[in-house]
Image: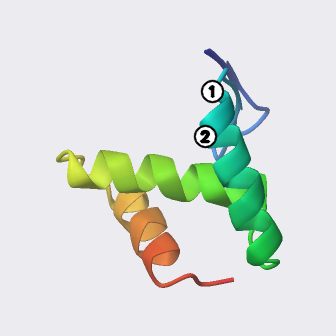
Amino acid sequence: MTLERGLSNASISLEAEVPEVLYQGMREYIRSHPDWDQYRLVTSALANFLFQNGCQEPGVSRQYLKGLFQEP
């Protein structure tokens, strides 16, 4: 996994290898939910993991709730 800081502190670039089965699941989900893209899906998954494992950062909580309620 590679993490690189972007020009602003608001976002970073992330590169990761994932198992084929997860990639296929991600592709199928995005195909059946046109309002989602790979960036939104990964952001939602990371926020979900962090929030459910005790992260109390307000930004993580906001991203978690945004994904939970599927805000565009």
Which quarter of the rendered picture does the N terminus lie within? Answer: top right
Tag 2 secondary structure: helix
Against 53, residue 5 (above or below) is above
Quadrant assignment for the C terminus: bottom right
Residue at (40% x, 75% y) in the render: 65
- Does the residue at mark 1 contact the one at mark 2 (Cβ under 8 Å)? yes
Q: Position of residue 5 (x, y in %)?
A: 69, 25
Is 45 left, or right, of 60 in this rendering?
Answer: right
Q: Which residue carries the number 2 mark?
A: 22
Res 24 → quadrant: top right
Whether residue 26 is visible here, answered yes or no, is yes
Please, what is the three-letter code of the amino acid marked with disc 2? Leu
Colouring used for the render: rainbow
x and y percent of residue 64 in the render? 41, 65
Q: Residue at point 35% right, 47% down?
A: 49
- CA neighbours of label 1 inside 10 A, class few (<14), some (14 to 19), many (20+): few
Left or right, 8 with reference to 62: right
Instruction: Return the x and y of residue 71 as percentages of the image width and height.
Output: 60, 84
What is the secondary structure assignment of the residue under circle 1?
loop
Q: Which mark is residue 18?
A: 1
Q: Count the numbered circles shown.
A: 2
